[in-house]
Amino acid sequence: MEFVAAKADGSEVRYKDGKRWLWFLGPASTLVPVFSFWLYFAADRNPLAVLIPFFYIFAFIPVMDAIFGEDQNNPPEEVVPAMSIDKFYDYIAYVSIPLQYLIFIGAAWFVGTQELPAWAIIILIIGIGTESGAAITIAHELGHKSDRLNRYLAKIALGVVGYGHFTMEHNRGHHVNVSTPEDCASAKMGETVYAFALRELPGAFVGGWQQEAKRLGNKGLPLVHWENEILQVYAITLVIAAALVAWVGWAVLPFIIGHHFFGWYALTQVNYIEHYGLLRQKKDNGKYEPCQPRHSWNTNHIVSNLFQIHLQRHSDHHANPMRPYQALRDFPELPTLPSGYPGCLGLAAIPHLWFKVMDPKVMDWADGDLNKVNVCPRAKVRLAAKYT
């Protein structure tokens, strides 16, 4: 499909999205566990087959990012309005939702009916739980839209991992406080991903409930009410969990709990790398400067960006949160991650390596001034000795 628009001078601009059909790689990647299950049975129930989802995320995609590199292409601004209303891009997100449920339910059946060693169950929980974090990515995209259908579908997507408080906290909390010490979802320089998780997971939960209580209160409604959007998501999650227990048996419950935890933790890891150390400065009136593209880490690695519907072009997203994923832009001189998100998650899991790579990048971004950095208080003395 070719998008056609007129420039300000009256001349015509034509644009073809070279990634249009490649966006389907995102929903397709959701089915990787199916191959893992097939191989398990084809190899006479060899449990090594369950390693595939884990290594697909943390090894295969980073290697593909390294091989295929970055895509810095931006669509012309003149065609963005037409791209934004093209339902084709919405369908990419829509088709991912039933596939996410298919894989989760299929994995629960697989774990509950096969005699797997404990290590295989654990690696499946981590691999498929992390992969199911992509359901939150879909909900993130749809939850930023203003129409009722997309926001309803966002809640269904969140039901895959039971992260019902996400949209409330993300839209009304994180986007307001991003890259400030007040934001539980913005990591501080010198803070490990594990310390960040202990702050972000409960902080997002409490923040989401506070935002929903405020929203309902403004409508004159109590917190416990059928219009509570967090409880709506929890209801979806609990009904599916109960159905799985009734179908497969109680043995599947640890998998469900572990799966949901790693779905949550997948988002936590992504939040950790998206704003690490970046700080918006306060103005003379005590308010923070508006969020700009430079307040989010960006990456243009094409493979992981296709799988995550441009979530990694996070700089433009935070500066323009209503801009749809297909139209997100790259900008010159943005703070840039060394790899796509999957590769960075692996790096963040080893704090010493993460600090070694990212702390110099943060200081370059801040022109060597530690006072312009969102610093972890516990690490401030160590970092001050190193960088001042």
Image (spheres, rainbow, N blue to C red):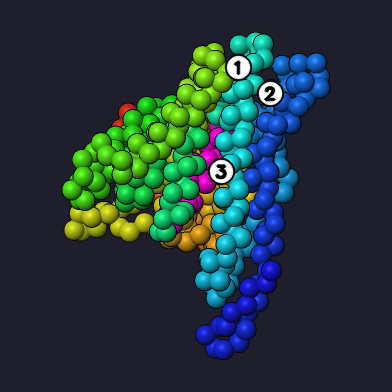
Q: Is residue 32 visible?
A: yes
What amino acid type should be assigned to the residue bearing mark 2?
Leu
Residue that numbered label 1 is attached to? 112
- Residue 131 shown in magenta: yes
As drawn, the label of residue 97 is 3
Q: Is residue 333 visible?
A: no
> If the image is split into quadrants, where does the C terminus sit?
top left
As drawn, the label of residue 177 is none
106 or 343: nearer the eye? Answer: 106
Q: Is tag 3's residue or tag 1's residue first in the polypeptide sequence?
A: 3
Q: Secondary structure at mark 3?
A: helix
Asked whether the residues under the numbered discs 1 and 2 touch, taking CB atoms below 8 Å apart as contact, a structural biologist would say no
Q: Is 208 on the left or on the right of 6, as rendered?
A: left
Q: Is 305 on the left or on the right of 47, as rendered?
A: left
Q: Secondary structure at mark 1?
A: helix
Q: Judge whether 247 appears above or below 84 on screen.
A: above
Residue 42 is situated, as x and y percent measured from the top left of the image, at 81, 22
Residue 85 is situated, as x and y percent measured from the top left of the image, at 53, 67
Please report the residue visible at 68 percent of the width from the left and 47 percent of the height from the top: 25
Please report the residue visible at 38 percent of the width from the left and 31 percent of the height from the top: 201
Near mark 1 (Cα within 10 A), the count class, few <14, some 14-19 or many ≥20, is many
Q: Secondary structure at mark 2?
A: helix
> Which range of residues does the magenta coloring cover?
130-145
- Residue 192 shown in magenta: no
